[in-house]
Image: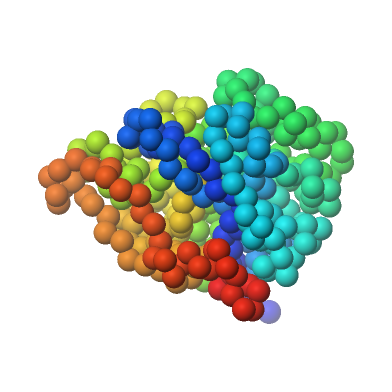
Amino acid sequence: MALVATTYEIKVLDLMDVDVQRAFLVLARQLGTVVRAKTWSYLILGGEDPILVDTGASDPEIMARLGMTGHVEEWQGLDAQLALHGLVRDDVRWIMHTHHHIDHAGQDDRFPKATVITNRRELEFSASGIMGAQYPPEYVKHHIDRLHTPGELRLLDLELSGPDEVLPGIVCESAGAHTEGSMNILVPTAEGVACLCGDIVYDLQNAVIDPYHVGLDREPQTTGNHGMRKREEKAAIKKALASCTFFLTGHDYPARIEHGRVVARLVKGGVPGPEVPVEHRLTSETHQPGHGEHEWQPPSAANEMVAVPGATGRVP
Ligand SMILES: [Zn+2]
């Protein structure tokens, strides 16, 4: 019997919009101005059971603890977004976490049938107090409960083990940035490997494609919310970009990468899926620093799929 490699499809789940300082998303960019950012989870289909990557915030109001404003329309949120794929919460067998921040690990308690897979360092880091209210005590306590309930939690030791294949073909590795325990999740698709890298980048346009106030060639700009040293934050972005064909962050539209360069954004909620070409500025070609002048937005037709599910009731 020939072995057939498993490939997966990844669906973007649109959970919440958040009003946030631009300088939080990209370091020191347009200080004092606010932008509305997406908050995604990702659903991985094609294996034996559905896999959910991150569970979003517990509720939009909790974002006020960080001075942010969360918005959830009726078509957003986990239940509505899972329903677009014919799923309910109990269908989700595995939850994986890029990290445990307030907008990523808030609904694990609503999935009692799922096993949570995460990095042990992230659990420790979440209880350390170093990033304050970004790790709500409710979330941390729930994870401690899972720690003492057989089968509810699987902890990885990625800093020591190196890359770990946790489910067929799906490999986790230490992200090396944003938080001490953040992990990248590498997922094989029919068109190449997707890297789900959490929040090592928030705003791809102004951190990577046209990095704000950076003159060095192929040098990313960091976020304004990082827990590691500058060199580690930058190296983590380079490492993730080098590891994949599709680059998927927690708050921005996915991107296709070719030879370390962003060549397109994916705009229809699926990876692989329809793409819009983009121009990745390289300062070795332009001899100008990054401008950081605008937000990248998908074409309006793409917005419709997020706002109004198609007649089939499924995200295209
Ligand atoms: Zn986040």
The part of the image, by quadrant, that contains residue 84 is bottom right
Indicate left or right for 99 with 113 as reference.
left
Q: Quarter of the image containing the C terminus? A: bottom right
Task: Identify the residue at horizontal 78%, vertical 57% (top origin).
Answer: 89
Is residue 111 positioned above or below 28 on the image? below
Q: Kindly give the residue lying farthest to the top in the view shown.
A: 129
Q: Is residue 301 above or below residue 69?
A: below
**Quick check: 305 left or right of 30?**
right
Give x and y (percent) for residue 195: 50, 53
Say which residue appears at 26% left-offset and 59% top-offset.
279
Residue 224 position by quadrant: top left
Residue 63 image point, x, y percent? 61, 35
Q: Is residue 229 visible?
A: yes
* Total numbered circles: 0
- For image coordinates 68% across by 79% down, the residue present is 1
User: Residue at the spot x=69%, y=54% of the render?
Assistant: 78
Residue nearest the observer in this picture, 258 or 256: 256
**Quadrant of the rendered image containing residue 11:** bottom right
Name the one closer to the observer, 91 or 33: 33
Q: Residue furthest left?
A: 287
x and y, in percent, of residue 156 in the image: 67, 40
Please provide percent x and percent y for residue 294: 30, 48
